[in-house]
Amino acid sequence: MLKKTRARRAAAVRHRQLLDTAERVVRRHILEGQSGSDATPAEMVALAFGRLALHIDEDEARDYLNAVLVERGYPLPGGAQ
């Protein structure tokens, strides 16, 4: 039971950290006068590793970036639905 609780808590912390990282990537693009949709999964992967020591793949990075873009009202890159 304790292991399950710890695993759930660790997953929630990781999820929040990755959402915050995606938010940081999108915000940086907006502040530079670009569209938030210009943020790339590769930037997300690099920042997640550099700031959090988390290894994620580009598909997972894309999911987090898309979540932040949709939350901010931006269209998804490439017209993805």
Image (cartoon, helix red, strand yellow):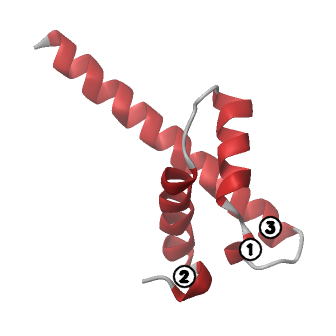
Determine the CA span between mark 1 and mark 3: 7 Å
Q: Which mark is residue 11?
A: none
- Which residue of the protein is positioned furthest toward the right in this rendering? 32
Residue beneath disc 2: 73
Q: Position of residue 16 (x, y in %)?
A: 47, 42
Q: Circle 3: is it few (<14), some (14-19), or many (20+) Cα within 10 Å?
A: some
Q: Where's the N terminus, which quadrant? A: top left
Relative to 7, does residue 36 appear above or below in the rendering? Answer: below
Residue at 46% from the left image edge and 34% from the top image edge:
14
| Residue kind at label 2, given as amino acid type | Gly
The secondary structure type at the circle numbered 2 is loop
Return the residue nearer the eye: 64 or 16: 64
Determine the CA span between mark 1 and mark 2: 14 Å
The secondary structure type at the circle numbered 3 is helix
Relative to 62, does residue 37 appear above or below in the rendering? Answer: below
| Residue kind at label 3, given as amino acid type | His
Q: Which mark is residue 38?
A: 1
Q: Position of residue 26 (x, y in %)?
A: 70, 64
Front of the two marks 1 and 2:
1
Relative to 64, does residue 36 appear above or below in the rendering? Answer: below
2 or 3: tag closer to the N-terminus: 3
The image quadrant that residue 54 belongs to is top right
Q: Which mark is residue 29?
A: 3
Compared across the picture, whether 43 is left or right of 52 comes to right
The image quadrant that residue 38 belongs to is bottom right
Q: Are marks 1 and 3 in contact (CB under 8 Å)?
A: yes
Residue at 61% from the left image edge and 80% from the top image edge:
77
Compared across the picture, whether 32 is left or right of 55 comes to right
| Residue kind at label 1, given as amino acid type | Asp
